[in-house]
Amino acid sequence: MNQNFDIALIQSHLAWENPIQNRTHFTNKINEIEHKVDLVVLPEMFSTGFTMNAKEVAETMDGDTVQWLLEMSNKKDCAIAGSIIIKENDQYFNRFLFTTPNGGVEYYDKHQLFTLAKEQEVFTAGQNELIISYKGWKIKPQICYDLRFPVWARNTNKYDVLLYVASWPKPRVNAWDALLKARAIENMCYCIGVNRIGLDGKGYEYNGHSAIYDVLGNSVLDENPIEKEAILYAVLDKSHIQTIRKKLPFLDDADTFKLL
């Protein structure tokens, strides 16, 4: 088990509906990471931008972007995570992927689809939660709009990290900031949010504010908020979680209920 977990968050512009250009861009960004990390995190729909044009840009689990993730994981000897558009059984999913150096792939399909963009008319909502076990850490992935729904993130599995990838627009970034901190505090975990920057093909602007909060809601990053393209580094400490949960056993006092 790793007591420390070394991560790199890539906050970046995205080329609209251009997987080849985005893969090239992120290859260069990942290659800029000079020291050994355990996990690299990319934004939501990092290969295309947040588009509803799934029919034209969707890939399969055997497609180029999944293969690229596996190759980069192997090359950099780390896990890599982010979401892309996947077509499966004539359905489209906004799918979070977590690839590992040994060729492993785990995935989570976005549950709360963004109705303002009519995401629910194009994509199928995922119904299954996922806890990823990696190097002794338990990670729960979520995607963007999931952040507004605390029950779906509820820490009933004693996970260590709640991880959001997003395309969260500038006009509502104050909600992003507040909710990431709230999720860390209420779930007594590290909460990570990786957002994009720049303009998308529909003219919507994104200004980043990628962040990491600890169990008490304190920012882990030296600079916060960050509104430019950047690779953000942090080391998570398992003893921080263990010490605070032992001193403040709030998770043990939660009501017991199940999602229908």
Image (spheres, grey):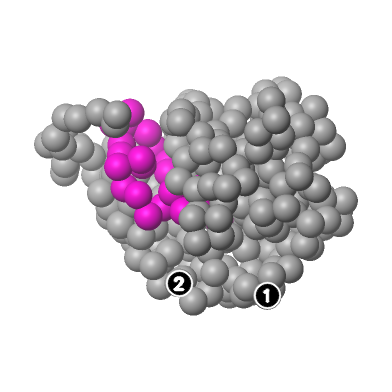
Marker count (numbered)? 2
The local secondary structure at tag 1 comes to: loop
At x 82%, y 33%, the residue is 63
- Residues under numbered marks 1 and 2 in contact, where contact means CB atoms less than 8 Å apart: no
Q: Which mark is residue 203?
A: 1
Question: Does the image show residue 17?
Answer: yes
Magenta range? 143-166
Q: Is residue 186 above or below residue 246?
A: below
Q: Nearer the viewer, residue 195 or 168?
A: 168
108 relative position to 92: left or right? left
At x 30%, y 42%, the residue is 151
At x 28%, y 52%, the residue is 185
Q: Amino acid at mark 2?
A: Arg
Q: Position of residue 90 (x, y in %)?
A: 70, 30
Q: Amino acid at mark 1?
A: Gly
88 falls in the magenta region: no
Q: Position of residue 51 (x, y in %)?
A: 68, 56
Residue at label 2?
172
Q: Which mark is residue 96?
A: none
**Front label number (1 vs 2):** 1
Quarter where residue 217 is shown: bottom left
Question: Which badge, 1 or 2, comes first in the chain's sequence?
Answer: 2
Q: Residues within 10 Å of mark 2 (few under 14, many from 20)?
A: few
61 relative position to 252: left or right? right
155 falls in the magenta region: yes
The local secondary structure at tag 2 comes to: helix
Q: Position of residue 121 (x, y in %)?
A: 57, 48
Q: Position of residue 228 (x, y in %)?
A: 64, 74
Q: Is residue 120 above or below residue 95?
A: below
At x 20%, y 37%, the residue is 251
Quarter where residue 94 is shown: top right
Quadrant of the rendering where the C terminus is positioned? top left
